[in-house]
Amino acid sequence: MTPEQIKLVQQSFNKTVPITEKVAKKFLTMLFAIDPKLKPLFADDPKGKRLMATFTTFVKGLSKMDSINGIAQQMGVRFKRMGIRMDDYMTIGAALIETLAFFQKDDFTPSIRQAWIEGYGVIASIMIRAANEQSI
Ligand code: HEM
């Protein structure tokens, strides 16, 4: 990811801050439309509040990877134990990007979309790699 791409991701995420509840709701609707099997996983965060807080941490962390590397690895291992697989990462990534596109319409340019794909991919691959290195 280039510094410019990191900025694009952070700027477009910041636009969602004032409408965070709406974004969380749409994200979950989008997610369960793609894969209803994921519903039970989010039973104790029905409005997606924790989820949005999590995204905030990681979007900020893109410009300071040292600050999120460790937590991303830990979460990757924890998710593996919860039964979360690589496919699920694709699903979450797609739901997240389509949600942003839904709210930002024409402002969500192809270069912003590409920056998100790369940013999400950077973090997801840290998590998946940590999960795969763990034998349990
Ligand atoms: C880059 C991708 C992802 C990142 C950075 C991420 C990060 C996190 C973090 C930091 C938490 C802890 C939140 C808290 O305790 O308040 C969390 C919780 C959670 N995540 Fe993810 N996650 C990602 C992908 C996924 C995927 C693919 C799934 C499943 C489809 C998932 C499902 C969950 C669930 C169900 C929780 C709440 C349960 C728990 O904390 O044990 N996440 N995520």
Image (spheres, rainbow, N blue to C red):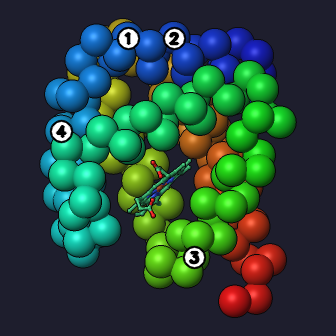
Q: Nearer the viewer, residue 45 or 76?
A: 45
> Residue 6: where, in percent of width, then height?
67, 20
For the N terminus, the quadrant is: top right
Q: Are marks 1 and 2 in contact (CB under 8 Å)?
A: yes
Callouts 2 and 3 close, C-beta under 8 Å: no
Chain-order first, disc 2 or disc 3: 2
Between the residue at mark 2 and the residue at mark 3, the CA separation in whole angstroms equals 31 Å
Could you tell me which secondary element the residue under label 1 belongs to? loop
State the residue position of label 2. 11
Residue marked by disc 1: 15
Which disc is residue 96 wearing?
A: none
Residue 101 location in percent, x, y?
Answer: 32, 27
- Secondary element at image label 4: helix
Mark 1 vs mark 3: in front: 3
Residue that label 3 marks: 80
The quarter holding residue 58 reads: top right
Q: Vertical placement of 98 versus 111: above or below?
A: below
Q: Secondary structure at mark 3?
A: helix
Q: Which residue is mark 4?
A: 25
Tags 3 and 4 in contact by the CB under 8 Å rule?
A: no
The three-letter code of the residue at mark 2 reads Gln
Q: Which-is-in-front pick, marks 2 and 3?
A: 3
Q: Is residue 101 left or right of residue 68?
A: left
Dot 3 amino acid type? Lys
Say whether marks 2 and 4 touch (CB < 8 Å).
no
